[in-house]
Amino acid sequence: MKKTLSSVIALSVLASCASVEQPGLKDVFQDHFMMGAALNEAEINGTDTLGIELIKKNFNTIVAENCMKSEVIHPEKDRYDFSLADKFVDFGNENGMFVVGHCLIWHSQCAPWFFLNEDGSQIDAEELKARMKEHITTVMTRYKGRVHGWDVVNEAVVEDGSYRQSKFYEILGEEFIPLAFQYAHEADPDAELYINDYGMNVPGRRDTYVRIVSDLKSRGLRIDAVGMQGHMGMDYPDFAQFEESLNAFAGTGVKVMITEWDMSALPTVNRGADVADTEAYNAMMNPYPDGLPEDVSAKWNERMKTFMDLFVKHSDVITRVTAWGVSDDDSWKNDWPMRGRVEYPLLFDRELQPKAFLREYMKKEHIK
Ligand code: 9MR
């Protein structure tokens, strides 16, 4: 969160008033699922003190937004960097939270060395298996009993249902997924194991994940949940499709988790938009730099409530709802696709106040 000194003072006052009046989200939804947030570097390092207070009050599960990704935690073949990850795990453990590790096997944010021999040629299947096993075992063993669930494989399938053409797939084929789950379970038999992706409403991707999960189960491999990331906008995902996917995943016998929830309030990025000059494009894509207009905010809140109600309705299978950040300033969606874009996708606004749809739930204290 980026704050000036005066806004910090104002925010402290607001935050202390709020803590008297408002129950924490984890208490509001305690009968249904854990409420979580992804933590960034400033929160993990403790420099964002207000953010930390908000997290302790509202969330009983946390996930690492970036510090456990393989290029961060394992930047070179024989070098790991656990500095930030250790602090993240300590924070969760000290505060009695359910700690989630993100993520073990992902095509993105994976250092190039992972797939290369010393001479620069590509490694073969046996070597990739050895490297995956070593990476998974080292990271999970370090946090055994302290990280309670892992995104084992992230974003492995594309919209039409085919496997993503990643290095893992290119070198090992479909087997890279069962192998990853096998290594993860061997490393920490008590840890929950998840497969995670975005755009899970899309039928092609949904069907492939149903097949993958069923296959893992039929081989006797542990898989506890499918993670539906939940990066949303005002015009996606399709609500009915999202619910169909939720039911389809639950139908395989695993739990479902909403793992990276956020909803853009701005126009959906469409690179093909017919706008010739950059200034006009930027103005179109960054329409509310000084605050979200009431009517847009009302629509956003209404849509968020619709999804939250859906999660509550399916809370027999949904065990966790995690937002991808705490307050709007934290979101990866700011500054993307252009610098200076101001987004409003998270559960708390820039003054660290809960969004309107959450205040409605909070009035009821406990959602039954
Ligand atoms: O929010 C994350 C952002 O800070 C990073 O720059 C980016 C690349 O590592 O990853 C973002 O988080 C992604 C997550 O790890 C996987 N699903 C999509 C998320 C948003 O891009």
Image (cartoon, helix red, strand yellow):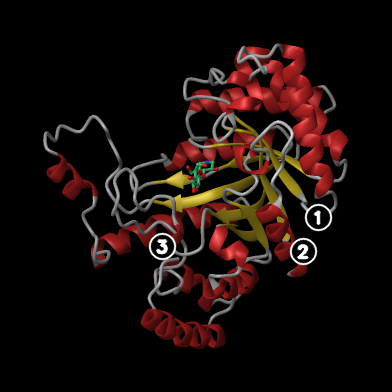
Q: Quadrant of residue 89?
A: bottom right
Q: Are marks 1 and 2 in contact (CB under 8 Å)?
A: yes
Q: Residue 251, image x and y in percent?
A: 68, 34
Q: Report the residue marked by disc 2.
A: 93
Separation of residues labelled 1 and 2 (CA atoms): 7 Å
Mark 2 belongs to which amino acid?
Asn
Q: Is residue 54 left or right of residue 295?
A: right
For the residue carrying disc 1, how many other residues have a C-alpha within 10 Å: few (<14), some (14-19), or many (20+)?
some
Q: Residue furthest front?
A: 119
Separation of residues labelled 3 and 1 (CA atoms): 29 Å
Residue placed most toward the observer, 264 or 9: 9
Name the element at disc 3: helix
Name the element at disc 2: helix
For the residue carrying disc 3, how many other residues have a C-alpha within 10 Å: few (<14), some (14-19), or many (20+)?
many
Q: Are marks 2 and 3 in contact (CB under 8 Å)?
A: no
Numbered mark located on residue 146 in the image: 1
Mark 3 belongs to which amino acid?
Asp
Name the element at disc 1: loop
Tell me what residue is drawn at x 70 percent, y 28 percent.
213
Q: Report the residue marked by disc 3.
A: 329
Q: Are marks 3 and 1 in contact (CB under 8 Å)?
A: no
For the residue carrying disc 2, how many other residues have a C-alpha within 10 Å: few (<14), some (14-19), or many (20+)?
some
Numbered mark located on residue 161 in the image: none
Q: Is residue 346 left or right of residue 34?
A: left
Of pointers 3 and 1, the one earlier in the residue sequence? 1
Can residue 150 be seen in this snapshot?
A: yes
Of pointers 2 and 3, the one earlier in the residue sequence? 2
Asked if the beta carbon under badge 2 is closer than 8 A to the nearest atom of ligand 1, the reply is no
